Amino acid sequence: MKKSLALFGLFFCVHFGFAQQQPFLRVDYRSTMLGDRIDILEGPNILNKQEVMELMRYHPEALTRYQMSVKKQKTSRWLDGAATLTTFGIVGLSFVPPQSSSFDSRNTLMLPLLISSVGLGIVSGIFRRSSRNMTREAVDLYNFSPKEEKPSYFDDGLTYYHIPDFVGFQIRF
C-alpha cells in the first residue's frame, strides 16, 4: 500500500514537472443562423480574438494563419447573408399571384435569384471550409511548435534564457 502510494506520488510529481507551460488550445465549431462560428477553447474557456492573438504573438506563422482564417470567416458570413437575402427574395416572389401585373417581372427575376442563391451558397461553403481548415492549422502550429521564450536582458551584462526544460545564461561582450 505504501509502495503504491509512493509510486502514485512520484508519478504525480513527475507529471506536473513535465506539464506544458503554455495553454493547449482546441477548436470548436457551432452552426449559427448566418454560417458557422469557430471558437478556440483553452480548457472549458472560450477565448475571444484578442486573447488568441495575444497567445499566438510569439508564433508568427500561426498568427498569420489565424488572421487569414478570421478574414475568410468574415467573407463567408457576408456570403451567407447574401445567400439568405436571395432566398428570402425567391420566397417573396413565389407568393406573387399569377393574375397580377408583376407576374411577368417575377418570372424574369426568379431564375437569376435562384442561380445567385445556389452560387452564393456554394462559394460560402468553400470559404467556410477553408476558414475551418486554416484555424485548425493555426491551432496545431501553436500547440505543436517548439515553445521558445524571448530572452530577458538585465543590466549586469548577462542574458538569461528560460526554456521549459533548461535554464541557462550567456555573457554578452
Image: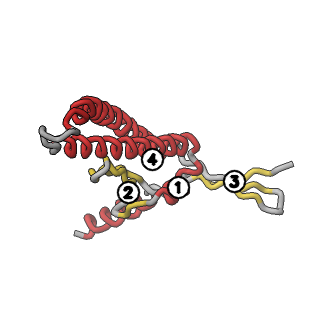
Disc number lying in front (4 or 2) = 2
Q: In which quarter of the image is residue 119?
A: top left
Residue shown at the point (66%, 52%) measured from the top left: 150
Residue 143, numbered label: 4
Q: In terms of sequence position, does the residue under pointer 3 or pointer 2 come before the other?
A: 2
Q: Nearer the viewer, mark 3 or mark 2?
A: 2
**Which label sits in the foreground, 1 or 4?**
1
Q: Mark 2 falls on what kind of element?
A: strand
Q: Where is mark 3, residue-wise?
A: 151
Looking at the rendered structure, the kind of residue marked 3 is Pro
Q: In the image, is 132 to the left or to the right of 60?
A: left
Locate the N terminus by quadrant.
Answer: bottom left
Q: Which of 153 and 109 is in front in this view?
A: 109
Single out the mark in the foreground, 3 or 1.
Answer: 1
Tag 3 secondary structure: loop
Which amino acid type is shown beneath numbered disc 1?
Answer: Leu
Q: Earlier in the sequence, mark 4 or mark 3?
A: 4
Q: What residue does disc 2 label?
A: 41
Q: Residue placed at 75% from the left, 50% from the top?
A: 170
- In three-dimensional space, the C-alpha distance between marks 4 and 2, rounded to whole angstroms, equals 12 Å
**Residue matched to label 1:** 55
Indicate the position of residue 109 as horizontal and vertical percent values: 27, 33
Q: Position of residue 7 (x, y in %)?
A: 31, 62
Residue 85, placed above or below residue 125: below
Alpha-carbon neighbours of circle 3 within 10 Å: few (<14), some, or many (≥20)? few
Q: Distance between the residues labelled 3 and 2?
A: 28 Å
Q: Earlier in the sequence, mark 1 or mark 4?
A: 1
